[in-house]
Amino acid sequence: MISVDITVERGDFSIAAHFEGPSNGVTALFGRSGSGKTTLVNAIAGLIRPDRGRITVAEQVLFDSAAGIDLPAAARQLGYVFQEGRLFPHMSVRQNLLYGRLGDRDAHPTLAETVELLGLKAFLERRPGSLSGGERQRVAIGRALLANPRILLMDEPLASLDGPRRAEILPYLADLRDALAIPVIYVSHQMDEVIRLADTMVLLSEGKVMATGAVEEITSRLDLAPLTGRYEAGAVLPCRVAGQDVPFGLTRLEFSGGTLWVGAVHLPKGTPVRVRIRARDVALALWPPRDVSMLNIINARITEIGQAQGPQVDVRLSAGNDSLWARLTRRSVSELGLKPGMQVQAMIKSASIDGASLGQIGRVRRSEIDTV
């Protein structure tokens, strides 16, 4: 368990943050630029001294202003991955990796395990200058792991990469999450990274923690949409792989409210996955539609109609034990006579659920997943 309850004051900017993260898994610090994410993770790392408060990891006190405890960064036994790899250019990949090894050289993960986990074997003897940006970040992650950390801090590790390089490294980060038995603090302002990797989400705005909880809970709250991103707002559903339609390249997922068809996800039957359904991708009908192209038609009940935002209104739906959101025009809401308590049919295009909207949950190796 990691516990943070601190205040940091820097000129006109201050942070008042309180949250707890699980003993393993990924806790995402999410917010816009300037919300305080990097300052907060640097305080955990010991690179910035908070003005007040307390930080503990696995019951060890790293900082306690009342008790006068402030362990130096080198004594905190943390792994830190920065936005840039910060590798030694004159060293080989192997030498960069081993530079991070502290303590027992056979501690988990070993060099061999790290190389296998991050796919580094092919360029162990090369120097960083000959690697792509994604490859350099994988080496930086490996170096941090070989420090045998009790917690891994990752400050927007994909921010400096273009789209293809981000897509290249995300599966490795998912492998990493599933292989480690330590907590990971992951800083990001990209919702697709949070959906793909995180278990817990800490939402930051202007130096304050606005909400903390499971990713599914935080991303499904309409009141937080201005902070999580109104354009991307919607629901995140916990599902399981139920079957494959190989001839048509589709996968059938099941959740508490019914069935979803998505582009092929090559995972074993029963594998738990997380699916983001954007409000803008959901349409409503009063009766079960016929002869339509949408494969996903979910029986749902209206539970809330939000305040109008210009010509648009967000409508919250209950489907089984889960919630969905539909973003409609005010005219549609009026003409259909939509009200809380009404039964409706929620229609979702399979093509709207892409690879960036899917995240696997649990120990599934990168070689076992291929989303399209």
Image (tube, rainbow, N blue to C red):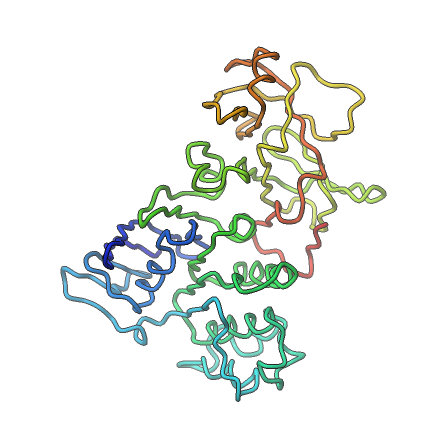
The quadrant in which the N terminus is found is bottom left
Q: Is residue 223 left or right of residue 7?
A: right
Residue at the spot 85% in from the left edge and 43% down from the top edge: 247
Q: Is residue 3 left or right of residue 276?
A: left
Identify whether 242 is placed above or below 195: above
Number of marks: 0
Q: Is residue 271 left or right of residue 104?
A: right
Residue at the spot 17% in from the left edge and 61% down from the top edge: 65
Identify whether 64 is placed above or below 269: below
Q: Nearer the viewer, residue 39 or 360?
A: 39
Q: Is residue 48 left or right of residue 249?
A: left
Residue 333 position within the rendered picture, expressed as x and y whole percent measured from the top left: 57, 17
Outermost residue toward the right in this view? 247
Q: Nearer the viewer, residue 232 or 200?
A: 232
When asked about the image quadrant of residue 161, the answer is bottom right
Residue at the spot 81% in from the left edge and 22% down from the top edge: 291
When asked about the image quadrant of residue 295, the answer is top right
**Residue 363 visible at all:** yes
Q: Nearer the viewer, residue 84 or 104?
A: 84
Residue 345 position within the rendered picture, expressed as x and y whole percent measured from the top left: 65, 20
Residue at the spot 76% in from the left edge and 42% down from the top edge: 250
Residue 241 position within the rendered picture, expressed as x and y whole percent measured from the top left: 67, 42
Outermost residue toward the bottom in this view? 90
Identify whether 84 is placed above or below 58: below
**Residue 317 visible at all:** no
Residue 283 position within the rendered picture, expressed as x and y whole percent measured from the top left: 64, 25
